Amino acid sequence: YEGKQYVNERFIGTNKAAWNFVANQRPQEKFGVMWFGVDDSSFSLHAPIYGVTSRVPPSWYGGNCTGRAACRESFGLPGTISNFSLQAMHWVGQLVAAQAYTRYEDVAPVVQAELAKIEGELFEAVAAMDEKVKQGAGAEEATRFSYETMERLHARWLEFWGQLFA
């Protein structure tokens, strides 16, 4: 800028992130998709959320609380930043990432492989849902797809953590 150079580098994956996302606008499709992940992007499982989604499961919902415990509790949401809960995707993501970071050489490749496998399945599921949208499915069907997918991902990631732990 004005003859000066500036550099602002940031790691893509940092353990100080609370969440991350990739927004896919997809002008050729009726609805965009946001791929939302908890914790840092290095070991984050991303859930496909259609742009018209009107609700998400409590395990993923933040209630617009930005980590405020009293706010989360007022919404009846599981877990807070200082109150551990396996019912909160944030904590499940933290558990998987902690295993990967503390046993990086052995566990990180396993987590990356599982992420690639699951996300490949999710790309196929989104493509199938897109076809339903082209056939007339609307916002409620897209919401249901996102909601149910997020519920399954929470259960699957929790089970995966158990496999890593054992």
Image (cartoon, rainbow, N blue to C red):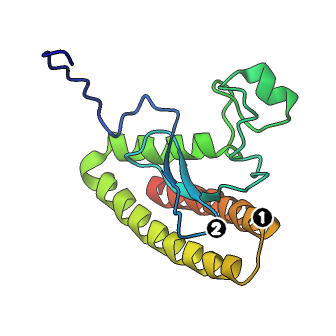
Rendered residue at 49%/61% (across/down): 163
User: Please, what is the three-letter code of the amino acid marked with disc 1?
Assistant: Ala
Look at the picture and state if 42 lies above or below 115: above
The answer to which of 28 and 76 lies nearer the viewer is 28
Look at the picture and state if 49 lies above or below 28: above
Percent x, y for residue 82? 65, 24
From the viewer's perspective, tell me whether residue 39 is left or right of residue 110: right
From the viewer's perspective, tell me whether residue 15 is left or right of residue 35: left
Percent x, y for residue 106? 28, 54
- Residue where numbered disc 2 is placed: 30
Rendered residue at 76%/80% (across/down): 136
Q: Secondary structure at mark 2?
A: loop
The answer to which of 62 and 153 lies nearer the viewer is 62
Percent x, y for residue 112? 35, 59
- Residue where numbered disc 1 is placed: 139
Percent x, y for residue 152? 66, 65
